[in-house]
């Protein structure tokens, strides 16, 4: 199992930096640890937000607020730790897309109230949200996701570690590598979900 410091050291290795970070929470005091402490959470959340992997996908009902707008009937509190809204669905939806009953994801809008509270506006009563949640437990990350995060982090570290034109060029290259690994991770994740949906227990197969 890779830890957050393992991912940081992997990112540094992508840049040819031989430093070994021991801890980033709190940072141990080295420049590399300070940079990793700043940029690792951003890189991790960015990858999860863009990928929407199954281990970071949740469904939840939302708290109804008493501040609807003229354009929308209902206002709901955005769940804490939500990185990305994937869909707003009816409470009894059996599919994320159109099904035999014609159920589809509902229209919605994201806005902020005067006090900064983020809300989800929709015309759906008792709405359920499907969303990407912030995950900090690296034990849940697959090797492909870990690699993608390490390259995303390396892109952020390239400037302060390599500096100048070399840092900018390497940062762009690392972003491309991160995108490639995210694509591989998404293919793997989708394949596993399909296999899970199509799996038939042996007890059922025996009755066929």
Image (tube, rainbow, N blue to C red):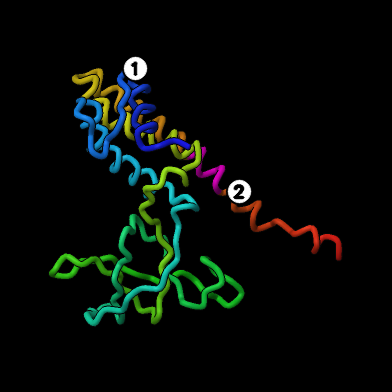
Q: Is residue 164 left or right of residue 61?
A: left
**Res 10 quadrant in image:** top left
- Residue 108 versus residue 85 in the image, above or below: below
Residue 18, given in percent of the width and then of the height, sits at: 33, 17
Residue 106: x and y in percent read 42, 72
Residue 55, compared with residue 33, is above or below; it is below
Q: Is residue 91 visible?
A: yes
Q: Quadrant of residue 156?
A: top left
Query: Callout 2: helix, strand or loop?
Result: helix
Which residue is the site of mark 1? 16
**Left or right: 118 in relation to 184:** left
- Determine which residue is flagged by label 2: 192
- Callout 1: SS: loop
Q: Residue at x 29, y 33 (%)?
A: 23
Can the viewer see residue 179?
Answer: no
Residue at figure coordinates x 32%, y 23% from the top left? 20
Report the magenta residues as a range.
183-189
Disc 2 and disc 1: Cα gap in Å? 34 Å
Image coordinates for residue 38, horizontal then vertical, percent = 22, 38
**Nearest to N terminus: mark 2 or mark 1:** 1
Dividing the picture into quarters, in which one does residue 85 lie?
bottom left
Task: Please identify the quadrant where the C terminus is shown.
Answer: bottom right
Q: Nearer the viewer, residue 36 or 157?
A: 36
Q: Is there a contact, CB below 8 Å, between mark 2 and mark 1?
A: no
């Amino acid at each position: 199992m890779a830890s957050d410091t393992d991912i940081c050291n992997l990112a540094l290795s992508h840049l040819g930096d031989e430093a070994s970070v021991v801890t980033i929470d709190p940072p141990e005091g080295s420049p590399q640890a300070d940079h990793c402490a700043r940029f690792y959470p951003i890189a991790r959340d960015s990858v999860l937000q863009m990928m929407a992997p199954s281990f970071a996908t949740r469904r939840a009902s939302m708290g109804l607020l008493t501040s609807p707008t003229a354009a929308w009937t209902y206002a709901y509190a955005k769940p804490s730790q939500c990185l990305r809204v994937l869909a707003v669905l009816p409470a009894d939806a059996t599919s994320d897309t159109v099904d035999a009953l014609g159920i589809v994801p509902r229209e919605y809008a994201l806005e902020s109230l005067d006090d900064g509270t983020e809300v989800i506006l929709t015309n759906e009563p008792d709405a359920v949200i499907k969303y990407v949640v912030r995950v900090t437990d690296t034990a849940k990350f697959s090797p492909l996701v870990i690699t993608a995060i390490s390259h995303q982090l390396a892109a952020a570290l390239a400037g302060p570690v390599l500096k100048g034109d070399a840092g900018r060029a390497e940062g762009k290259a690392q972003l491309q590598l991160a995108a490639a690994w995210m694509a591989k991770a998404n293919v793997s994740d989708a394949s596993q979900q399909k296999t899970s949906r199509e799996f038939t227990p042996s007890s059922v197969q025996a009755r066929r």
